[in-house]
Image (tube, rainbow, N blue to C red):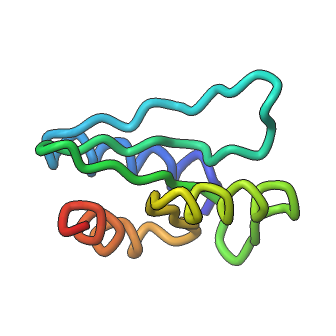
Amino acid sequence: MREKTIEQKLIKAVKSAGGIAPKMVSPGFDGMPDRIVLLPDGKIGFVEVKAPGKKPRPLQAARHRLLRRLGFKVYVLDYPEQIGGILDEIRTA
């Protein structure tokens, strides 16, 4: 399965949950996660989408650590079966 297909499934699931998942564009600050997931009641999480079995590049991993140190939830999504669990975690955070 391609990364784009997984990303589309994430967007659809977030929309079904009443939220949005805009694409992250961060000029001058490379390595940020692909999507910011915004759910009702002010719930937020960052999602890096990868093809199955692929891992974040070193710069991406560094950005994930930075965001986590700042108190944000950051997820690496490489299988569509993970989407429900990720959204549940964001909702309950």
39 lies left or right of 29: left
Q: Position of residue 39 (x, y in %)?
A: 22, 45
Which quadrant is the C terminus positioned in?
bottom left
Task: In the rendered view, tell whether residue 76 sits above or below residue 41.
Answer: below
Q: Nearer the viewer, residue 86 or 16?
A: 86
Residue lying farthest to the right in this orientation: 58
- Residue for point 77% across, 56% down: 60
82 lies left or right of 91: right
Across and down, in percent, residue 72 comes to 46, 58
The answer to which image quadrant residue 12 occupies is: top left
Up the image or down, 33 lies above or below 86; here it is above
Q: With respect to residue 15, does 3 lie above or below?
A: below
47 to the left or right of 48: left
Residue 43 image point, x, y percent: 24, 50
**Residue 52 x, y percent position in the rendering:** 65, 71
Is 31 left, or right, of 38 in this rendering?
A: right
Residue at horizontal 14%, vertical 40%? 18
The N terminus: image quadrant: bottom right
